[in-house]
Amino acid sequence: MPERSESDSRKLLRRLRDTLAVPGGGQDRLDQITHLIADSMGTEVCSIYLFRDEDTLELCATQGLKKAAVHKTRMKLGEGLVGRVARTGQPVNTADAPGEKGFRYMPETGEELFSSFLGVPIQRVGEKLGVLVVQSKTARQFSDDEIYALDVVAMVLAEMTELGAFTGGEGGMMALHKQPVMLRGTSGQEGAAEGRVWLHEPRVVITNPVADDPLTEIDRIREAVGQLRVSVDDLLSAESLDKDQKAVLEAYRMFAHSRGWLRRMEEDIMRGLSAEAAVEKEQSAARSRLEQVPDAYLRERLSDLDDLSNRLLRILTGQGKDTGAEMPENPVLVARNIGPAELLEYGRKLKGLVLDEGSVGSHAAVVARALAIPLVINTERITAEALNGDQILVDGDQGIVHLRPEETVARAFRDKIAMQAEAQKRYASLRGLPAITICGTSIALHMNAGLMADLPSLENSGAEGVGLFRTELQFLVRSKMPQRAELARLYARVMDAAKGRRVAFRTLDIGSDKVLPYMKPQDEPNPAMGWRAVRVGLDKPGVLRMQLQALIRAAAGRPLTVMFPLITEMTEFQQARSHVLRELHREKSLGHRVPETVEIGAMMETPSLAFAPRAFFELTDFVSVGGNDLKQFFFAADRENELVRRRYDTLNLSFLTFLEQIVARCAETGTPLSFCGEDAGRPIEALALAAIGFRTLSMRPASVGPVKALLRRVNLAEARDVINRSRDVGAESARPHLMEWLASVGD
């Protein structure tokens, strides 16, 4: 790279920095920048297109095109050459723009005079902000040096946008992280919350994108990379690492020791960027490259490079994860993703949780449900958009997040929260009353739990017991296998807190989306239907036996209820049951107190168990329908897949008919039956389940009140007639008819 090009690039960046340092409105600055770039690069045209929303680009400033087109010309993402740059995140360089595939002619701009076109993305670590374009009348390809120089300028524009350089003035752009943003994600846990953002890993804000002394900056980047390499090497030398952890860190080390990575950052610095800006430029460039790669493994390495780049930025700036900022009141935790142990450390002080990634069955979702806080996942851009202290509204019901909302939106949201709070007050008045319908049918409402912190909800919600205690949480939040004595103490505290109420302990339900940190994950094409739940326990009986011993000792003579997850055939239940009986005999022979009574039950989560021999229903002490998985397998609709998980209705009459068959089979043998899952906690669904014969429902604590309120004002015989009429007229779902009937019933 010639020294002259390097100095020209640095000169342009310094002129750009000086221009931005002069007081002025946003539009004035944009106009000055386009003039400066066109002059420096010797082109007739320089234009800046910025996103007005996630799909629309707008011409916001130009030197050389018609001024009347500014703030008038707009195009969709992917439309024209500018739209292609924005969509792909890659430069477009052509000597014949009108002849280029996808060219869009915009007569209001007067651009038909210009043949040559060079467009580069204005982006910052995954944030697409706009497109920077230069054009000339002479038909020519722009050189690599010119592309590089324009790319560096675009990087600085992105940084300056974050710092608010284009705020103010007529038509000026709002600073990044200042404007209201609505993000759509996926509901991971229902509920609504208003609060302030608390970032799990605060982003590094770069205040000096342009450097005066390249040699000093190169010394800084080399020293920081050296520290980074030492820290990664130290992590690799730890004796506690298993094979898989070492493999991940080896990938880290490969990136950290990459000569090409350091060389590219040094080249960026010689072009005029500071060390910090050079790190971010390469991070953005790598993201754009890897996002286009079809190979899933290579795309996954993107997160490794992101982590390393963020570590390097923290070394350069001295901004650690602990920035010294105080957690705001009503904190809403925002993270790319988070482990269960880290989430539990925050505890119930959180008002809500929003994640870039995640799934409805992830560890974070399980803990969020246990903490009873609203959760929105798959928001994609939340960690890029949010800053600590930003006002945030979390709508876990709709899977929507409002960041820095306008006051009208905030007022409407507060009205929604107030209505929900008022409803909860009404439900609280029913706490001590039974869930008895108008026709005199009593429905037992139980709650789901997984943490000691859940147990106070037994009193507060009015639940009659714990229909499901998820024991896997105690395994997921630890870095190593918990000890038997430790588990026994925990289970004993759970029984103590229940004060004699029934607690159904589900044995370890791992595999699929719940992989223990110290357990080697299985590479399965379809983990939801793979090696999980009771299958793991029967194949690896050591952990199962240890857990059963802990439960027996925790009971200390009190009644004990154990149920096994994902039983698909009678033989599996017989084997699992024999483990309980064997451990009871062993504990008694050791002189330990055994439970006064023991119930051993099965979770019916696959259709196959509904057709098990009569002997199974006679053998098991109870059956708990695991509605989430049973519905998934009945409809062949993966509940982790947003394209299909909401496609099928629980009140679909084919599904209700299938559930009726389960009710009938249990009735034949007098086998106690319950329904456990999200649908049990939705009032309309709970009504339908009660109408077809379920007499025990288990749900999250916050759902007990709404379900009880509805059940106490209906006649189940009438509700069943409505379902039957829906079936008679050939309806696909009973929902419309039930809703119509409820409206006629009134309060």
Image (tube, rainbow, N blue to C red):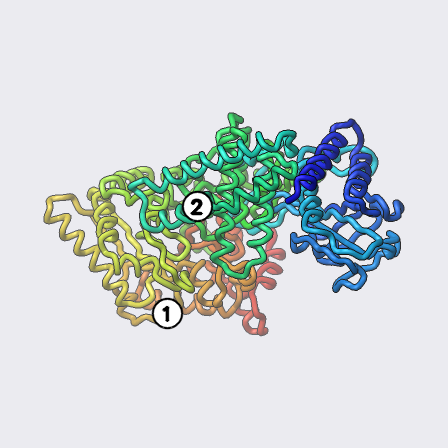
At horizontal 56% and vertical 66% (from top left) the residue drawn is: 733
Q: Residue at x 72, y 35 (%)?
A: 11
Image point 64% across, 34% down: which residue? 209
345 or 595, which lies in front?
A: 345
Task: Using the rendered image of the protein, determine whether residue 105 is visible from the camera's viewpoint.
Answer: yes
Report the side of 293 relative to 485 (left or right). Answer: right
Find numbered disc 1 in the image and state the secondary structure of the residue it sits on. helix
- Location of the N terminus by quadrant is top right
Left or right: 598 with respect to 149? Answer: left
Q: Position of residue 545 (x, y in %)?
A: 22, 52
Q: Position of residue 216 (x, y in %)?
A: 57, 30
The first of marks 1 and 2 along the sequence is: 2
Residue that numbered label 1 is attached to:
608
In contact (CB < 8 Å): disc 1 and disc 2: no
Residue 145 screen position, x and y as percent: 68, 47
Task: Identify residue for label 2.
Answer: 252
Q: In this view, does 580 lie to the left or right of 509?
A: left
Question: Can residue 705 be seen?
Answer: no
